[in-house]
Image (spheres, rainbow, N blue to C red):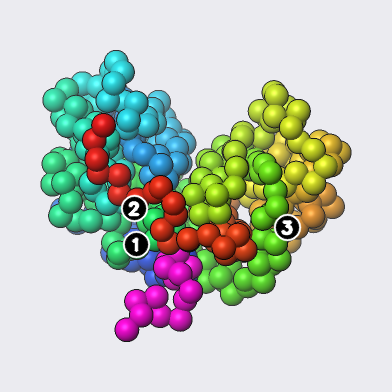
Amino acid sequence: MNAKGDFAHFMLKEIFEQPQALQNVLEGRIQGDRVVWENFQVSREQINQWNKIYIIACGSAYHSGLFGKLLLEKFLGMMVEVEIASEFRYRDSFVDENTLAIFISQSGETADTLAALRLAKKKKAFTLALTNVEKSTISREADVCLSLKVGPEIAVASTKAYTAMLVMQYLLSIYFAQVKKTLAAGERARILKGLLELPRKTSLILEEQEPYVQIAKELKSAENLFYLGRLFDYYLAREGALKLKETAYLHAEAYASGEIRHGTLAIVTPNTPIVAIAVQESVYKPTLAIVKEVVQQGASVIGVVNEGDQEMKKWARHLLTIPRIDNLVSPILAVIPLQLLAYYTAVAMGCAIDQPRNLTKAVTNDL
């Protein structure tokens, strides 16, 4: 029996598994207007003891941690550092017994993340792991491990596990905030309602594939691609660029929208593809302003926007839309178009999608 079923590649299969994967992540973790965790209770005193939070990971897991930083800072009012695990190991840090250190790894075996975990434990930090493999080394060695519960992910390029990491960090941030009483009950309820809508609205995005096929035909001849966004949208841009690089072998870079003015505009030439992610209302106007500027330089813009967006339509060559949802939750939905865009571009390029050259699913060798 072909484990891919009716899908041509594991990556596409796992993209389509995301509605169920999201349901699995959410199931049993939201009761009414509250987040609950089995076998994990942390007191208000414990949270108040933490004066520093570090999120430590590699690759896509690191990109998810950037989301966690914004969420924790917003909901807890604490400064949060996000570290690349391979760098954290070798530099001075301020980890001590008053630190919460969060480690994110799909496999739970990532060598640099494991080494960083062991270093943090030596420094007496409280360590919390998010993994997809419950009996992995990282899950065993952390003080607490929370499982993604999305099932095996076979393709090297992470899709459903990455999306689950995002949702887990929403839940974790809200949980800490409700213990600490730093998030209003009404706002908490609104965000949780949005999270519960994710499985159904993800399914809606997956109903239409043809736009991605057509855009991919244009992208396959590009020399450079740029992904732009602000705040959460910028962190999505980083993941989108990584997905395209690792699956389609195209040079893609992500920038915070305003930063493209600081040098990168020099290599924006006529028909340079630019993926502009603009789903957050709070930063929509400044992102649109940059889109107008790059279009005037001749760039070909692919806009990832909320359903019904009329302004981006005036400037973008292509629009990829997501269903309307609570605006703080909308960046999670915007992940799906970026994954599909990378997948179909890799198909158009004839690449080895599930096993990209030079890459492995879990980087377990220590250098």
Residue 230 placement: quadrant: top right
Whether residues under marks 2 and 1 lie with C-beta atoms below 8 angstroms apart, the answer is: yes
Q: Main secondary structure of the magenta part?
A: loop
Image location (x, y in percent) of residue 26: 35, 62
The three-letter code of the residue at mark 2 reads Lys
> How packed is label 2: few (under 14 Cα within 10 Å), some, or many (20 or more)?
some
Q: Nearer the viewer, residue 323 or 259?
A: 259
Residue on which disc 2 sits: 361
Residue on which disc 1 sits: 153
Does the magenta-highlighted stretch encompass residue 12?
Answer: yes
What range is drawn magenta here? 1-14
> In whole angstroms, how far apart are the C-alphas of marks 2 and 1?
9 Å
Closer to the eye: label 2 or 1:
2
| Quarter of the figure with the N terminus | bottom left
Local SS, label 1: loop
Local SS, label 3: helix
Total numbered badges shown on the rendered structure: 3
| Residue 18 visible to an observer of this rendering | no
> In whole angstroms, how far apart are the C-alphas of marks 3 and 1?
29 Å
The three-letter code of the residue at mark 1 reads Glu
Image check: 250 left or right of 242?
A: right
Image check: 114 left or right of 306?
A: left
Which numbered circle lies on residue 217?
none
